[in-house]
Image: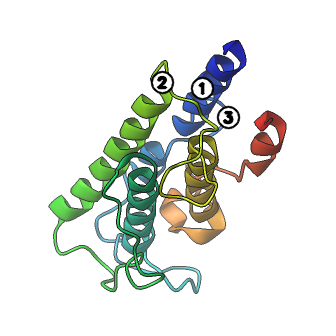
Amino acid sequence: MKDQETLKTALVRVLQWQDAHVSFAKAVEGVSPDNIGQTRHALPYSIWQLTEHIRIAQHDMVSFCLDEDYQERQWPDEYWPKEAAPASLSLWQQSLQAIQSDRQRLINAIQEPDVDLFAPIPRGTGQHLFKEAMLIVDHEAYHNRPDRTDQEAAGRLEIVAILSLCAFLCP
C-alpha cells in the first residue's frame, strides 16, 4: 500500500502542476478579454473554445471516474463549443472555475485512503483512476502548448506532454 500512497502523492503533484510546469490557471491568467474569442496562428479554435473544450473533456473524464449515473457524450459535437467567444466574461470565469473545481474533485478522490488507483472503473472497459488522471494531464498539456494558443499567453504556457511519466509510474 505504501507504493500506492507514493504514487497518489506524485499523481496529485502532477495534477496540480507543482513541479516543472505552469498550471492552467497561471497560463490563462491575464489573458486579455479582447483575445479570448480570437483565433491565432491559423488555428481553428479560439482561447475560449480550447478552454471550454478542456473543461468539458475534463468534466467528462472526472464524471466517468466518479459518478454512477455517468452518461457518455457524443464525440466531437458535445466536446467543442461552436461559439468563438463566451457570451460574457462571467461565463469565461465560470469555465475557469469549473476546470479547477473538477480537478480538485479528482484530487480529493485520489487522496481517499481506501482508493485503489488501479481498480477498474465499473462503467468502463478496463479503465482505472490512474489512467484517467494521466489522460486529463496529457489532454491539458496537449492543448496548452505555446504553439496552440494565443501569443500573449504563449510565454506562460510551458506545459508539455508527460506520458513518459505514466510509463515510469505504471506497474
Q: Residue under label 1, please give it.
A: 8
Mark toward the start of the polypeptide (3 vs 1): 1
Of mark 2 and mark 1, the one earlier in the sequence is: 1
Instruction: Look at the numbered discs 2 and 1 and tell me whether their residues touch, using CB distance below 8 Å.
Output: yes
- Is 96 positioned to the left or the right of 58 in the image? left
- Tell me which residue sits at (77%, 34%) in the image: 169
Q: Is residue 90 above or below residue 1?
A: below
Q: Earlier in the sequence, mark 3 or mark 2?
A: 3
Camera sees residue 81? yes
Q: Which mark is residue 88?
A: none
Amino acid type, mark 3: Ala
Q: Check disc 1 and report its element: helix, strand or loop.
A: helix
- Asked whether 60 or 46 is in front, the reply is 60
- Amino acid beneath label 2: Gln
Residue displayed at 43% across by 77% down = 46
Q: Is residue 2 above or below residue 92?
A: above
- Quickly name the residue at label 2: 111
Amino acid carrying label 1: it is Lys
As displayed, is residue 66 above or below residue 59? above
Query: Residue 28, percent across and down?
Result: 42, 53
* Number of marks: 3
Give me the C-alpha separation between circle 2 and circle 1.
7 Å
Position in image of residue 127 (x %, y %): 61, 53
